[in-house]
Image: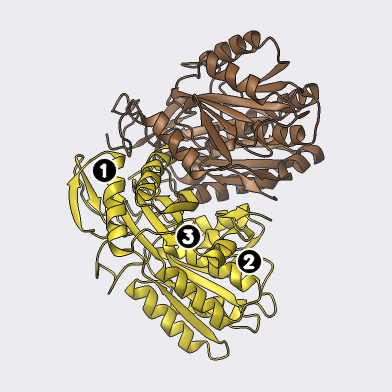
Chain colours: A brown, B yellow
């Protein structure tokens, strides 16, 4: 295993120290990443979190227009309730706090426990479960939450910034999730620092269709194929679950080890597929946003936009991982 | 070799098609990437280019506040003079055009030839040669040009946007290069699609110190070490060449296959090293900006800032790869 770390044990804290050093807009305390500016009175607070190893998700999305705090767990491990409680209490500006939770059993349990224990804060939650690849998985009952988490954080974050009440922000977060679908394909495994060897074995001639962001098994193995064929597999799976119609927000996301050039090759194919269905790509993201350490591969996430969602997507955002318009 | 492409032959054009589909702000024609908005009368045009495989450099830096056009060559291969001539003539708004050229023999020759053939356009050039690792290299006489290219494109681009004349924009570009130094370390080789196998062999227990962005040899091999030790090697090399003083712009850049989490670990060490020298990190970038396909590893680039450079760095920029303040 070759990793740019000091030790497997210190990797998460060392990375958080780097985030704090690189981004004066963030404050890191007790394994929670906050906006340095603190909570804004009357604004709904947004808290997310999950295992580390998916950067920039979630800590890289803390800032104006997205999250108020992120709770990073150990690599591929849920944050503990104490982190979530601290974050929730710290970011409450009196209007309550929305928990954005990817559907993994550990995350769900720990966010639920934290919500119950935050007696003085009004807490609502949204469960993100956009991954159409499999029903039930290694760490999940039901569908897994993956790329749509970014969409939920961005769009609900913009609405919260406008001063909408908790009920509306939570409703919008749920709506974005309902309008979104994802599918991922791995070319290689990831390697966690603690394990020191690949999470799974994948022959040089095969890919894993429907991979999870922790290397959980997908639907099947298939021979390595062209970007066009792989994009079609992903898009057929998505289209079969939620027909591609109207205006779409489309993310082609790298799993961490795939060069940007290849992601653009995949985006061209995804875009052509969508054109072929008579739908329109009106907003897009291409890059490494919801990663799995050093895994090579990509995922596609689509969201059916309407005018409100488009406006909120376009609203200013200023985070280390996503920044525009301000 | 596992790559997300349709074929080695079509990879560059397929990726450019993806860029065009993803970014309505860009226009791609005959292997040149332009701002869709076209040249602005009276503004100095900025043109850069080089081999593909370093994305987002250069095409991802086309847009307001940076480049007017980028000329992508084949993977790790210089663009041809015709591309550069077309780009130069197309972006001239009457105030002349600056060629930003990384110091590789092929790039230098082809940009020089293009400049000579653009008889109706006033052309100035800046040669970027920030890499302190080696004097002369596989494709270079003198020092290689790497991460500082982004700084030159951003800072000179901001000055051009303000309406400065060609002489001043070219002078600023040269000044940014003189104030900047880089050093890179590879944990793994890259693999070009055409070759289909790693460019060089690097044992599992070793790293290449002073790697070039095409996999050119560096200073030496060394045992795989901690992020702290590797960061010290890079920073000692930089500090030994240009002492770290005053306000610094610091980029910790991934080579394409290294997860963002590890880049933050490296940034923490780089930042601590700079603190230890009594200098200050006042601006920073952490991410994959000047890449080498799927290579794992990182480079550090520093630039000594003054008030003018800081102001121009902070100026609005709106490109696929770098975006803020607008």
Q: Earlier in the sequence, mark 3 or mark 2?
A: 2
Indicate the position of residue B29 as horizontal and vertical percent values.
58, 68
The x and y percentages for residue B286 are 46, 47
Q: Please, what secondary structure does the residue beneath circle 1 have?
A: helix
Q: Which chain hosts label 3?
A: B
Circles 3 and 1 in contact, beta carbons < 8 Å: no
B41 and B34: which is toward the camera: B41
Please rate how many residues cluster around mark 2, counting C-alpha atoms within 10 Å: few if below 14, some from 14 to 19, many from 20: many
Residue A141 in view (yes/no) = no
Measured from the top left, where is residue A263 in percent x and y? 50, 47
Q: How many marks?
A: 3
**Res. A34 image quadrant:** top right
- Same chain under badges 2 and 1? The reply is yes
Residue B57's disc number: 3
Which quadrant of the view contains residue A98?
top right
The secondary structure type at the circle numbered 3 is loop
A42 or A81: nearer the eye?
Answer: A42
Inter-mark Cα distance, 3 to 2 = 15 Å
What label does residue B229 carry, if any? Answer: 1
Name the element at disc 2. strand
For the view shown, which residue lies furthest in the front direction? B278
Question: Can you tell which mark lies on residue B89?
Answer: none
Q: What chain does badge 2 belong to?
A: B
Is residue A43 visible to us here?
Answer: yes
């Amino acid at each position: 295993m070759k990793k740019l770390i000091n030790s497997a044990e210190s990797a998460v804290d060392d990375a958080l120290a780097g985030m704090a050093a690189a981004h004066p807009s963030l404050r890191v305390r007790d394994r929670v990443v906050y906006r340095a500016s603190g909570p804004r009175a009357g604004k709904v607070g947004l808290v997310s979190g999950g295992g580390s190893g998916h950067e920039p998700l979630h800590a890289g999305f803390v800032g104006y227009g997205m999250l108020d705090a992120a709770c990073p767990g150990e690599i591929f491990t849920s944050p503990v309730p104490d982190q979530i409680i601290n974050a929730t209490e710290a970011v409450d500006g009196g209007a309550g706090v929305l928990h954005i939770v990817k559907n993994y059993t550990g995350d769900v349990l720990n966010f639920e426990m934290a919500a119950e224990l935050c007696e003085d804060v009004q807490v609502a939650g949204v469960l993100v479960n956009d991954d159409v690849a499999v029903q039930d998985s290694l760490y999940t009952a039901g569908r897994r939450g993956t790329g749509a988490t970014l969409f939920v954080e961005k769009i609900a974050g913009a609405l919260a910034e406008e001063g909408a009440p908790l009920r509306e922000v939570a409703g919008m977060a749920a709506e974005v999730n309902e309008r979104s679908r994802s599918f991922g394909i791995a070319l290689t495994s990831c390697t966690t620092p603690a394990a020191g060897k690949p999470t799974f074995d994948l022959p040089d001639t095969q890919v894993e269709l429907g991979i999870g962001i922790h290397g959980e098994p997908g639907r099947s193995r298939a021979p390595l194929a062209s970007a066009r064929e792989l994009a079609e597999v992903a898009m057929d799976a998505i289209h079969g679950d939620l027909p591609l119609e109207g205006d779409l927000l489309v993310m082609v996301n790298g799993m961490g080890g795939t060069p940007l050039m290849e992601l653009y090759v995949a985006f061209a194919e995804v875009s052509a597929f969508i054109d072929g269905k008579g739908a329109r790509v009106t907003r897009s993201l291409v890059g490494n946003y919801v990663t799995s350490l050093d895994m090579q591969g990509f995922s596609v996430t689509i969201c059916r936009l309407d005018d409100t969602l488009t406006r909120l997507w376009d609203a200013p955002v200023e985070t280390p991982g996503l920044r525009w318009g301000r």
